[in-house]
Amino acid sequence: MVKNIGIGTGRRKTAVARVYLRDGSGKVTVNGIELEKYFALSELVASVRQPLLLTASENKFDIVITVVGGGITGQAGACRHGISRALSTFDPTNRVALRTSGLLTRDSRMVERKKYGQRGARRRFQFSKR
């Protein structure tokens, strides 16, 4: 049986990621696919790996992530948040470094809802004076 050392839940926009830290060699899998294949953009991969680089634990853990909802950017943000939370639960000394970098704070920006009588959230119909 595989033992999870740390567990974290990350959220961003409408994406939710469940992160499991396990003893290993630094392999990261997202929904059963390796990280670099799941997030094709290198910026997103770097974003997800940021908490690991900050706490100098790139090759200490195998990380298994299950992420649902949202698009790839939201999912990458959720994974990053979840990894940060899992690292802080595993070792509370990591918390200070992660907090100062803003990785433990959930990004609360969401898509604003469409209002009735308008074309979008803020877009109005064209005003006609006459």
Image (cartoon, helix red, strand yellow):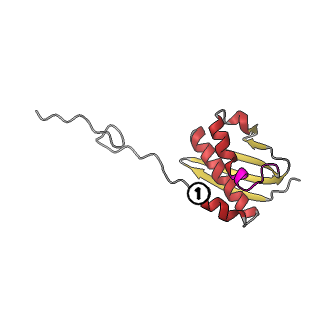
Which span of residues is magenta-colored?
A: 51-59
Q: Is residue 80 at all visible to an observer of this figure?
A: yes
Residue 55 in magenta stretch: yes
Q: Residue at x 63, y 43 (%)?
A: 76
Q: Is residue 6 magenta?
A: no
Percent of width and height locating residue 57? 78, 53
Q: Which residue is mark 1?
A: 102
Q: Residue at x 63, y 38 (%)?
A: 43
Residue that extends furthest to the right in the rendered view of this protein: 1
Q: Quadrant of residue 36?
A: top right
* The C terminus sits in image quarter: top left
Q: Residue most toward the left?
A: 130
Q: Position of residue 111 (x, y in %)?
A: 45, 45
User: Residue 105 location in percent, x, y?
Assistant: 57, 58
Along the viewing direction, whichever of 32 and 73 lies nearer the viewer: 73
- Quadrant location of residue 118? top left
Direction from residue 111 to residue 41 in the image, left or right: right
**In the rendering, at what x and y percent does residue 88 appear?**
70, 62
